[in-house]
Amino acid sequence: KQMSLGDIFRRRFGVAEQLEKIQLDPETEQKTREYFASLKQPEDPKLKWTWDTLLEHFQMMYKEQNDVVYSGVDMPVLEDLCRYFTKDIAFIPGGKRRSFDKGVLLKGGYGVGKTSIMRCFKSLGYDFGMKSTISIVQMFDEEGTAIVKMYGNKKMDFYFDDMGRETMGKFYKKEQNVMKDIFDQKYYALKQHKIKTHISTNMSMEKVIDKYGDRMESIIHDMFNIFVFDGKDKRKGL
């Protein structure tokens, strides 16, 4: 049986006497119930993690998923990502355009671990959706512009893997630059609702501009903290 709001209030604050019944409209009553429910939620342990604590958890998760710990010349980049996700103030002096309000852009060649790194952070409880740009365009080819709206309007942080590897979308013989249109909507989502976008790519800025237009250069600097991976393909020799 669902408790009345009066019962919830009396139990929460130790009020013994019966309170006068208050009639609330359905929307207000739902928000009130959600508020009291939020008071019971345990504190997220990630909120207390330092960047090096996150790095320890990351390495355990990475080894579980890839059978090796992350290592190599790009370790400083991974450490910087841990500072970003834990909102360590030491992250900000690393670049004039850095901000915790932006998402991350992971740039580097194939096999340096970009996708595996983001999958680890997601597995550790950092809340963002995840989909490859290739898969999104394939969905567009089958379902049309509804896919652009679906991913452009998602009310959550989202990671788009392998930006630039996708082809032009084609629905009923009409071609569309699907990811360009989604990025335009995600830029609006960041500015209006603080919803962050994360991406990975191996493209140079010149190729990004060529594929998505001149405006994409300024959008990238406004939307992303840029992390550059210089290492070799980690999949070779395994």
Image (cartoon, helix red, strand yellow):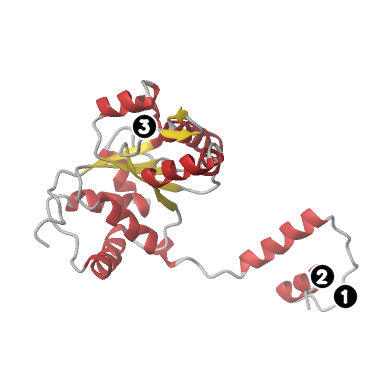
CA–CA distance between discs 3 and 1?
A: 57 Å
Outermost residue on the front side: it is 173
Q: Regarding mark 2 in the picture, which secondary structure is present there? A: helix
Mark count: 3
Q: Nearer the viewer, residue 136 or 201?
A: 136
Marks 1 and 2 in Cβ contact (< 8 Å)? yes
**As displayed, is residue 47 above or below residue 74?**
below
**As displayed, is residue 224 above or below residue 216?**
below
Q: Nearer the viewer, mark 2 or mark 3?
A: 3
Q: Is residue 48 left or right of residue 149?
A: left
CA–CA distance between discs 1 and 2?
A: 8 Å
Q: Nearer the viewer, mark 3 or mark 1?
A: 3
Where does residue 99 sit, x and y in percent of width and height?
38, 39
Q: Nearer the viewer, residue 86 or 132?
A: 132
Q: Regarding mark 1 in the picture, which secondary structure is present there? A: loop
Residue at the spot 72% in from the left edge and 72% down from the top edge: 13
Q: Residues within 10 Å of mark 3 (few under 14, many from 20)?
A: some
Q: Is residue 82 left or right of residue 75?
A: right
Where does residue 189 sit, x and y in percent of width and height?
52, 37
Tell me the residue that label 1 is attached to.
Answer: 18
Where does residue 20 sit, x and y in percent of width and height?
90, 68
Tell me the residue that label 2 is attached to.
Answer: 6
Q: Earlier in the sequence, mark 1 or mark 2?
A: 2
CA–CA distance between discs 2 and 3?
A: 50 Å
Q: Is residue 168 left or right of residue 17?
A: left
Residue at the spot 45% in from the left edge and 29% down from the top edge: 175
Where does residue 206 sit, x and y in percent of width and height?
25, 25
Residue 220 numbered tag: 3
Q: Nearer the viewer, mark 1 or mark 2?
A: 2
- Please state, as top left, top right, bottom left or bottom right, where the N terminus lies in the image: bottom right
